[in-house]
Amino acid sequence: MQVISQSTGRDVERSLGIPASKIDLAQPGYDPARFYPLPADEIAAFKRAKNLPERFWLFIGTLEPRKNLTVLLDAYAALPVSQRLPLILGGGKGWDYDPIFAAVERHHLGSWVQFPGFIPADELRFWYNSAEAFIYPSVFEGFGLPVLEAQACGTPVIVSDASSLPEVAGDAGLTLARRRSARGPKRCAARWTILNGGTLRANADSFRLRVSSGRRPPTKQLKAIGKPYMATKDVRPTTSWLEKPWLMPTVDALLAFAAFGIAYFVRYELQLIAPVLEFNRAPFEPYLPYTIVYIIWLYLNYRGSGLYKNIRGRSWLDESYTILNGVTNATVVLLAISFAFQPLVFSRLMILYVAAITIVLLSLARVVRRTIQARLRARGIGVQRVLVVGGGEIGRSVLRTMVARRAQGFLPIGYLGENEEDGSVDLGRLKGLGSMDNLASVLREHHVDHVVITLAWTHHDQILKMIRICQQRGVEVSVVPEVFQLNLKQVQVENLDGIPLLRVNGHVPLKGSNRLIKRAMDLILIGAMSPLLLLMFGLVALAIRLEDNGKVFYKQRRVGENGREFDMIKFRSMIPDADKLRADLIKTHELDPRHPKIKDDPRVTKVGRVIRKLSIDELPNLINVFTGQMSLVGPRPPTPDEVSLYEAWHLQRLQVKPGMTGLWQISGRSEVPFDEMCLMDIYYIENWSVGLDAQILFMTIPRVLLRSGAY
């Protein structure tokens, strides 16, 4: 007798008395006549017929606890928004399915997860072929058939290698395990194994998903969300609580009151600067009316100056200047009131203390708010998914600003061109989504929150039409005026008897005195670090020589500022004559020849693998910096072969000295595609400042130590 599971075999043995030696375990197979890769046109037609997203992850199976779908949703919710694709959970409702729908509501995934219901057998191959990846709780579940069927259709499978069958592994499947870091706070790295190679990771707060052979933790019974299929309300995680109109006025009022209390303590108890005579001592109560007037004046001033408006992209210095201006005005008002009424109890020095303390407290409150927002946005919370309409210079300028300044909370998902040809080219990870005629379908399929239109005003009819489409769907829309193909720093606003003039002043940040300041920073930092650098140079050189007795340094021809070539110096991290194998490896790995980065490069030596992971192999670049061929911060220098493949707009990144680190390094390093790297480099050139250089240098250190994106 043949059975299809060990559990059934034991039932047969126990119920019918057939010896185990006469029972065979049969493993069903899939039908290759039904499951195979489909042509692209058939897949596209199926997606249109089913109104499916362009890219999505797929689960097919009965919706029930044994499939561990609640844990799957926990891991999916932990993924940053930038790494998510829509998730489709296909299948009929099984026993006790309420916790699955409750998990969707608990994680605010209503606009991300779809439930198409039962999927007929004759449609299965179309669903498999349409999915970006097939997600399944166990390679053993369903006797392995769904995994085999998906792979037969050429679809990657995200799966656990444990079993969810009780008779095999104690109903384990995908399990949730907690861990603590060495410092104590819990962190998360959700990981799903992909059978076709690679892993999918995510960062969050409290847990990590792992494969386990232990028993699954008990499923908590949760109330269903009411509508079991296709929740349509957009309830993605947001930072709206940080943007409530009453929050910052309330915080400022409390801090201003605290400033009065601290100032009173400093003046009358600590008696700094000047002592307080006994007959001049006073309680705090007489200052309460001044406190109320002070708080009201600050509120009115800040409300009028726009401090309480949620403006993305506004700098902390701008906010601090507004705070300083408001405090100054309020202080003058209090001093004027005291002069007019001549109160018996009043310390002008204490009011000056109040002003200084208020400026510090309110400015620090903005720092805390920005830090919280940045951390939440790094986890995909409060991020706006942005679609740019227009692929010209203005559109690329908007894209590179969003890519370089992710802390502002914009996640560009792609762009639409003026026609199909213009919108068919991807810019790194930014997808070309076709022409602007596709706006309505792209808004629906890609969950767009904000549209930025960068078309010339000759398209005003299309612009008005697109604005109406966005408003009908509740999507925010912004229009970039055509004049802003000039950087704002290149424009000076003037007035000619009431007529506004925009004078182009040709401002280029890295010229003249700024160039000298940047050079001085490079030399000062190299001089300050020289003792440590000399020690590291010696240790690395010794390790390289001991490994294969070869050369310590490696020189490669690179292209620098304005196309001038120079020899860039690095520690040798590869076998001798490695360059001869480069072209073949680029072709084998199908890499972008303009920016080839080979993961697990076979040419790398053992020592080389270590120093490349830590970016120590680039330390000799400091010699190039010292001689003036490079800078500490700037675009990475390309090879002449790479430059020969550049398009015209790529050449803008050669307008300044190349650097050892840059925006690309702190944004993913080797994982950043070439076009995206160029967008960041051009943004850096157009917006250079001492503060931006300092920020990049400080953020480079943890990236290097954590080895993020290094090959």
Image: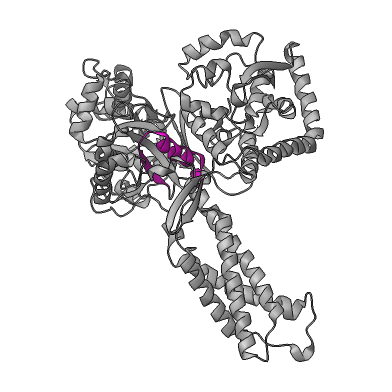
Looking at the image, residue 160 sits to the left or right of residue 522; the answer is left
Looking at the image, residue 518 sits to the left or right of residue 313; the answer is right
Q: How is the image coloured?
A: one colour
Q: Nearer the viewer, residue 99 or 325?
A: 325
Q: Nearer the viewer, residue 137 or 495?
A: 495
- 352 in relation to 508, above or below: below
Residue 553 found in image quarter: top right
User: Dividing the image into 4 quarters, which one contains the C terminus?
Assistant: top right
Q: Nearer the viewer, residue 476 or 250?
A: 476
Q: Is residue 172 visible?
A: no
Give, as a single range, the part of the protein colored magenta: 383-407
Residue 388 shown in magenta: yes
Q: Is residue 661 visible?
A: yes
Q: Nearer the viewer, residue 161 or 602?
A: 602
The residue positioned 52% from the left and 34% from the top of the image is: 682
Residue 348 shown in magenta: no
Residue 668: x and y in percent read 54, 33
Q: How many marks?
A: 0
Residue 617 found in image quarter: top right
- 337 in relation to 637, above or below: below
Residue 194: x and y in percent read 42, 27
Residue 371: x and y in percent read 55, 53
Residue 93 found in image quarter: top left
- 478 in relation to 616, above or below: below
Residue 301: x and y in percent read 51, 70
Specify the farthest residue to the front. 497
User: Dividing the image into 4 quarters, which one contains the N terminus?
Assistant: top left
Looking at the image, residue 234 sits to the left or right of residue 160; the answer is left
